[in-house]
Amino acid sequence: MSLPASVPLHKVKAEALVPFNHRRIGGRWLVSNDLGDHVFLTDAEFTTFVQAETRPGDPLHERLVAGNFLAGTVDVQTQAARWRKKKQYLFYGPTLHAFVLTHRCNHGCQYCHSSIVGMERTDTDMSIETAERAVDLAFQTTSPGVTIEFQGGEPLANWEVLQHVVEYARQKNALAGKALSFSLVTNLSLMDDDKLDYLLDRKVQLCTSLDGPADLHDKIRIYKNGSSHELVVGWMKKINDRYKAMGLDPNLYRVEALPTITRPALGRWRDVVDTYVSVGCRAVFLRKLDPFGFAARSAKTLGYSMDDFVQFYINAVEYILELNKQGTQVMERHAAIMLSKILADEEPNYLDLRTPGGACIGQIGYAPDGSIYSSDEGRFVAAMGDDMFKVGTVMDTYDRLMTNAQTRALVMAGLNDGQPDCVSCVYKPWCGQQVEYNYKTQGSLHGRMRDSVWCKKHKSIFDYLMAKLERADPEEMRIFERWTTHRVLDHFLQERSAL
Amino acid sequence: MTAQETQTPTVERLDDAHSRVTLALEIGLYPIDVLYGAAYIFIDRAYVLLDKDEGVGRPGRYLVHLRGKNPMSHEQLLALCGEFGNELLSQALRRKVVKQNQKIIEEITTQAIAGAAGGTLPTDFLANQDDGLDFLDDPLGIAVPWEEKFKKKKDEPGAAP
Amino acid sequence: MSNPNQTVLLHRALYMQQAIKQAAETFADFASFAISRQGAHYAVAISDIDAEADGDVVAEFCNFALYNTMQRKRKKI
């Protein structure tokens, strides 16, 4: 973005300013710096700013000082501590450990990105030996927290190993003392009362897929034994009731559900949001169809352009804001993550929006055969026949996994500081990239942000939110404040001495 | 980037019938590793042959011959040309950005890996630090799957000797 | 492959001889390769191309030669 025509380049006093990026938003200039501060300036204010002509006592000067935009006024020690706090993830290893317990699944979802097989293929299940070795590796992370996420296929199909992992990890944690938690990503079709009792007793967080109203959900998420929607909604209600009966705050503790937005959903943002509200969800995470697996193969029928998605997203968030104004508390998760970074100066460590990205150093994916991938997406690429993101196996040492040439290349490629466009983007302090996505869509780990749909999606959402912040409607700002109030779900943390 | 470096290659020849296209770009517009880097991106979906035309009485040129591994329409071939040009620009620019920010990139990477590994880095880690900075960001080698597939086919019982 | 014998010219400024040799070794099961110099190029005479081979041996060989060159040059950087 070039400077306003009113600013002669020779008058810019770069030495007096903290390096910044800028972008036109809603008739003003949005200016940001690498520390994560931002300010909106009129043309005249912007000109005064870049010419370093403000004086102490001027309201503009004070705003710029508060935002760390004037080089001579920055408290370096305070800002270094702030940077370190937000970049805490650079100081420890992967927290998220995705265990793919099986490739078996009883659903035939049109967009599935995993390499699923029929329910008879028990040979694709993770063995107890592999699972134990994976848990051993997970506990070697230097991170104080370990989240083991069960995935598939349908992970409940390998129930014996799931239980074993939970027990084995809890046992290990008696010594390790990490902040240990479990989550289960399930279509709920194999859930029964005994399993639910166990999962609730062991504080395993439950997460499922819900694509909207029944006709939409069942059309895409095909379940030969009946309506997947009916089944999911039924279990969600039952589980939420159980949380309530356990005395957990119903505002916080609910089954997490995620929709995947397909072409038939594009015109139905109200239906999707209403479905979530009707089953008691307080958050909707509007996820775009990804370029992996079946999703890539079914793009012709289910796919859409990024422009279409962004329009859907804006329509849906506008509707969500409308509901909030009418008293229904529901948030859009993507917006909440971005706003937490921008408004609350927090780093939620959302792996898709951090730099460097989460590949290897933020998360690891363990396949049933013991292969280890850089991430969930890394194993989706593998499911398409390309082992580019296989970084080792459970027989490797943790040190080797973290320090080998591949991990290093993935980390470096996932840095905004090495990316044209990113380095000069006003959203750089809050954004990130995913090397697996770059590779799958553009052929290299680095990709080209200029024509990357990843970049387009995030830039569009940032633009939309920043336009809201620039306008600063008091009611919407109050809603955003609620969305950025972080409450820890500590019930799901295992007791340090769980045994 | 200089004005020269923003020039895109010209389409020298386009052969719809054989899904082939030849691009030409002046020698000196881009560093050679940028040309390699762009070519690398395409070798999973196209056959790539690089050549050099020394030029008599005019500047020399690099010639890039691309042929789709699968049949391609006229529009797809044109899109391929455009994408190659974009990739050249992107690689050239990224090279400059990385050079400019090399110190911070190295420091963040070192911290991230050291943090993950608990502070123990292999002795050659720093020496190899620039591995991710050049045009080859695939330490595995993208060409391998075809070879494996090929060999497997040959090794199958009953396959031609 | 309809033509069992072909010659490809690989420019010496763009392809490394060792990289070409390495590609020839990779494809030794499918064709015979003879590398010589011809002006500014390496001339690679490819003969006895396996008619049963699943794919374009010559074109794949060229991709490998290019890829091997990139890898070798990279190590020199």
Image: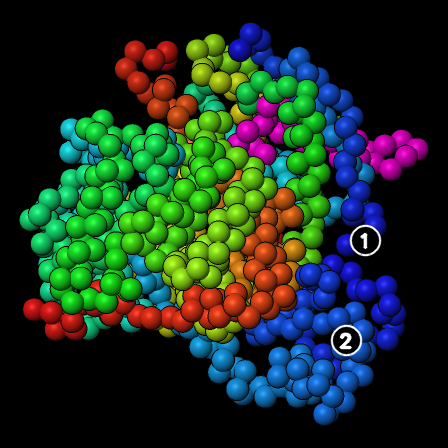
Nearest the viewer among B93 and B48 is: B93
Distance in Å between CA atoms under marks 2 and 1: 32 Å
**Total marks placed:** 2
Which image quarter: residue B160?
top left
Nearest the viewer among A67 and A275 is: A275
Q: Position of residue A117 (x, y in %)?
A: 25, 30
Q: Are marks 2 and 1 in contact (CB under 8 Å)?
A: no
Q: Secondary structure at mark 1?
A: loop
User: With respect to residue A488, does A397 lie above or below?
Assistant: above
Q: Which residue is mark 2?
A: A45
Q: Is residue A387 left or right of residue A134?
A: right
Q: Position of residue A16 (x, y in %)?
A: 74, 82
Query: Is residue C44 among the parts visible in the rendering?
Result: no
Q: Which residue is mark 1?
A: B2
Q: Does B65 appear in magenta?
A: yes
Q: Residue furthest front?
A: A326
Q: Is residue B142 left or right of residue B9?
A: left
Q: Which residues are magenta?
A: B42-68
Q: Position of residue A129 (x, y in %)?
A: 14, 49
Quadrant location of the N terminus of chain A in the rendered image:
bottom right
Nearest the viewer among B38 and C21 is: B38
Q: Which mark is residue B91?
A: none
Q: Residues within 10 Å of mark 1 (few under 14, many from 20)?
A: few
Question: What chain does mark 2 sit on?
Answer: A
